[in-house]
Amino acid sequence: MRLRELALLLAVVGLACLPAPVYLPALADATSPPPKVSQSYRAETVSLANESDTETIVDRHGRTVSISVHQVSHRYSAGEYRAPNETRETLEAAMRNGTARTTAAGARADLRAIARNNTYVHDAYGERQRYYRFSVEENGSLVTARNVTLQRVANTTVERGAYRYENLSPEARETVDRILRNSSDEDFGYRPRVNDAFVDRHPALVEKEGTLHSITVYGHVDDFGFGSALVVGLGVAGVGAVLILVGGVMYAVAWWRE
């Protein structure tokens, strides 16, 4: 092969290598498994017979049956409520006095919606966090609140919010089992992939073979930095640039000799 032809060949190969930082990451994304979520999860065994576990159950999972009054605001509800100020004030008054009334149409609609989705109300930022069983009557005009024990809230949380392992799909059971297997003191939890079954329900309570497990976030992982495919792509592009340079020099030498 003549020197000039070899130089042209090197230049063509080099040009083909230059787009590698673009197509190699795209190819990697198309062929690699789905990414993992940014949290790792661990499971802790809890029991309703244990007072400290009762607090744990309510603190971690009580949101399934209870709402804190601070959530009824423009800041935390993202426009969910029609009259958040009046609604929150009515709930707070009921918690203080046992009953409260409102004539605001927006607040009445908000209170009816809250009662449909929650059994208890509390103030997560109060001096002493107490839970109240509340009810809404007279089309939302009257709110009644009665103080209840933490044990009762925990019981309701488990009764209504705990998943029964045997009722889960095989894929969801596999996700739960992976978390359980990685929940010893020496483990850092299990980090599922974004498409794993049951991931969208965490944190969660799961009852398996008579034992109650509290699955919660154990740690966060930030996937910063260049992906390996991009690094390889940059290397290939670098080789391509060198080939173009060498090919150009060889072509110039061949042209000068001729």
Image: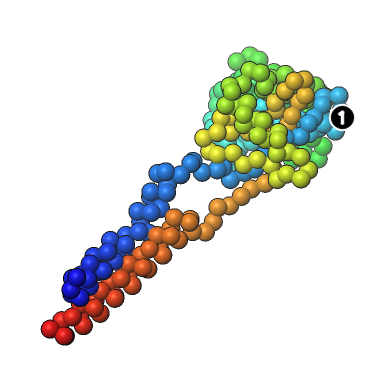
| Residue at horizontal 87 percent and vertical 29 percent from the top | 51
| Residue at horizontal 51 percent and vertical 35 percent from the top | 195
Residue 15: x %, y % from top left: 27, 64
Figure quadrant of the N terminus = bottom left
| Residue at the outermost bottom position | 256
Q: Residues within 10 Å of mark 1 (few under 14, many from 20)?
A: few
Figure quadrant of the C terminus = bottom left
Front residue of this view, candidates 179 and 73: 179
| Residue at horizontal 76 percent and vertical 45 percent from the top | 186
| Residue at the outermost front position | 1
- Kindly indicate the quadrant of the structure image that contains residue 13: bottom left
Front residue of this view, candidates 145 and 11: 11
| Residue at the outermost top position | 138
Front residue of this view, candidates 206 and 131: 206
Front residue of this view, candidates 173 and 118: 173
| Residue 213 visible at all | yes
Residue 61: x %, y % from top left: 71, 31
Total marks in image? 1
Residue marked by disc 1: 51
Is 72 on the left-hand or right-hand side of 45? Answer: left
Q: Secondary structure at mark 1?
A: helix
Q: Amino acid at mark 1?
A: Glu
Colour approach in the figure: rainbow
- Kindly indicate the quadrant of the structure image that contains residue 209: top right
Q: Is residue 18 above or below residue 70?
A: below
| Residue at horizontal 72 percent and vertical 23 percent from the top | 208
Residue 188: x %, y % from top left: 70, 45
Q: Is residue 119 above or below residue 37?
A: above
| Residue at the outermost left position | 258
- Kindly indicate the quadrant of the structure image that contains residue 10: bottom left
Residue 217: x %, y % from top left: 67, 40
| Residue 84 visible at all | no
